[in-house]
């Protein structure tokens, strides 16, 4: 381990009210309060072990993700955040960004106030769509009205930094319908918007429904048109498109997520969480009972670790940096790897430029407009 390490801390809360048909994030549906209590105790134990083992960790951000972290009550969330403060040093004097993901219907004014008092200062609400028909098709349990009530409650309680998650390419989504969702969201003036193209994950109920012909998706062309329209509309309303799926008002980019995209270190705690420290990736067990039991014995619940080869680290860096609209800085790559990106990936860079997916200037490589739409094709070029 290096000397003092500034890292982002991710805490995984693997509980949901119900499972959405498209989702393959690790979470279970449970109302078992005893299990939640044992999980929180284990999570805090995991922090304590890291405090003892790695005294040089200092936090620059905290992110509670899931699952649905706001399924926990305010007192439980407060307990988790104060344990972070008592177990880790904090980087700098500036107020640190602390984010929590929330599902519509799981926060109201009183709970929002408790979250703010605990130190949480950024809320990320998963709206996905403002079309109740579309929400139903993807198995969301909330409506547009539930979302608006949660958003307004958070604002009234005093949240001044809110992200809204949206998705495009959803079943039943039309150009007019999606535009209505976007204009409805823009009217609310959230500081940040994440916009994800629906990805069909293997083994999800949605995959089976599509295979059985019970659900139809918009065509690839329509999905791409939805994305292009969204980029234009958000730009017109002062949102900077700074990462493929992320848009922010000036000064409101996500500090925590930029740690991932800038290939910096992070510590992930909780069942199924991953960490990236000293060029090694650690994967926690994705099994609640095993996770809790190991921590009860004082053992870190790491199932396996991966040491990335030099080439893997280079590929990762290129992909992460190309996700950012500022692109890959050639000097930055050279300084980190002591070789030029052209020396290692000359053929791939040439092909992508020929295909009009990548642009090059004196200092950087960047995705073109076409490259943004076909980003996955670009990224696979760098993976062996
Ligand atoms: C960790 S998830 C869950 C956050 C929260 N539980 C919720 O559902 O609102 C964060 C975001 O990833 C996006 N997401 C999840 N599964 C996806 C998929 N299969 N394709 C595209 N986006 C997805 C959704 O926009 C979701 O809000
Ligand atoms: S999308 Fe969010 S609420 Fe739905 S199952 Fe996944 S984590 Fe849970």
Image (cartoon, rainbow, N blue to C red):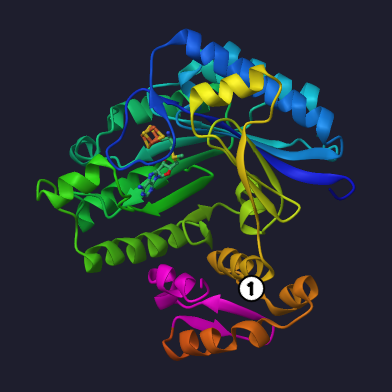
The crowd level at tag 1 (other Cα within 10 Å; few <14, some 14-19, many 20+) is many
Of all residues, the one furthest to the right in this rendering is: 3
Q: Residue at x 59, y 88 (%)?
A: 346
Q: Quadrant of residue 127?
A: top left
Q: How many marks?
A: 1
Q: Quadrant of ligand 1?
A: top left
Instruction: Return the residue at label 1.
Output: 328
Is residue 257 visible in the rendered structure shown here? yes
The magenta-colored residue range is 357-384
In the image, is 159 to the left or to the right of 190? right
Is residue 116 visible in the rendered structure shown here? no
Q: Residue at x 32, y 52 (%)?
A: 198
Residue 31 in picture, x, y percent from top left:
39, 13
Residue 209 in picture, x, y percent from top left:
16, 45
Vertical relation: 282 (above or below) 332: above
Residue 6 in picture, x, y percent from top left:
79, 45
Whether 207 is among the magenta residues is no
In the image, is 380 to the left or to the right of 292? left
Vertical relation: 230 (above or below) 305: below
Vertical relation: 166 (above or below) 156: below
Residue 136 in picture, x, y percent from top left:
21, 35
């Amino acid at each position: 381990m290096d000397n003092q390490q500034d890292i982002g801390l991710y805490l995984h809360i693997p509980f949901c009210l119900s499972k959405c048909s498209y989702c393959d994030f690790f979470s279970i549906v449970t109302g078992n309060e005893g299990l939640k209590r044992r999980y929180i105790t284990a999570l805090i134990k995991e922090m304590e072990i890291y405090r003892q083992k790695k005294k040089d960790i200092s936090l620059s951000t905290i992110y509670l993700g899931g699952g649905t972290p706001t399924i926990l009550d305010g007192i439980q969330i407060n307990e988790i955040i104060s344990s972070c403060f008592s177990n880790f040093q904090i980087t700098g004097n500036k107020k640190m960004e602390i984010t929590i993901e929330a599902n519509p219907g799981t926060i109201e004014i009183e709970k929002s106030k408790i979250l703010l008092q605990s130190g949480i200062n950024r809320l990320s609400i998963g709206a996905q769509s403002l079309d109740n028909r579309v929400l139903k098709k993807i198995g969301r349990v909330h409506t547009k009205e539930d979302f608006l009530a949660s958003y307004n409650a958070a604002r009234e309680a005093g949240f001044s930094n809110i992200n809204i998650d949206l998705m495009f390419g959803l079943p039943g989504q039309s150009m007019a319908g999606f535009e209505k969702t976007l204009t409805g969201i823009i009217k609310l003036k959230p500081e940040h918007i994440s916009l994800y193209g629906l990805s069909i994950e293997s083994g999800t109920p949605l995959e089976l429904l599509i295979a059985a012909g019970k659900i139809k998706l918009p065509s690839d062309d329509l999905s791409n048109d939805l994305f292009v329209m969204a980029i234009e509309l958000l730009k017109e309303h002062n949102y900077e498109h700074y990462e493929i799926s992320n848009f922010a008002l000036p000064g409101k980019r996500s500090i925590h997520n930029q740690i991932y995209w800038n290939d910096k270190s992070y510590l992930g705690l909780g069942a199924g969480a991953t960490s990236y420290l000293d060029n090694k990736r650690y994967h926690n067990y994705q099994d609640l009972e095993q996770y809790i039991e190991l921590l009860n014995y004082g053992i870190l619940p790491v199932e396996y670790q991966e040491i990335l080869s030099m080439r893997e680290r280079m590929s990762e860096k290129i992909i992460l940096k190309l996700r950012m609209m500022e692109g890959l800085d050639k000097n930055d790559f050279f300084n980190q790897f002591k070789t030029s990106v052209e020396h290692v990936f000359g053929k791939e860079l040439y092909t992508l430029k020929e295909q009009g997916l990548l642009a090059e200037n004196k200092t950087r490589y960047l995705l073109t407009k076409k490259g943004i739409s076909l980003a996955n094709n670009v990224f696979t070029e760098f993976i062996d």
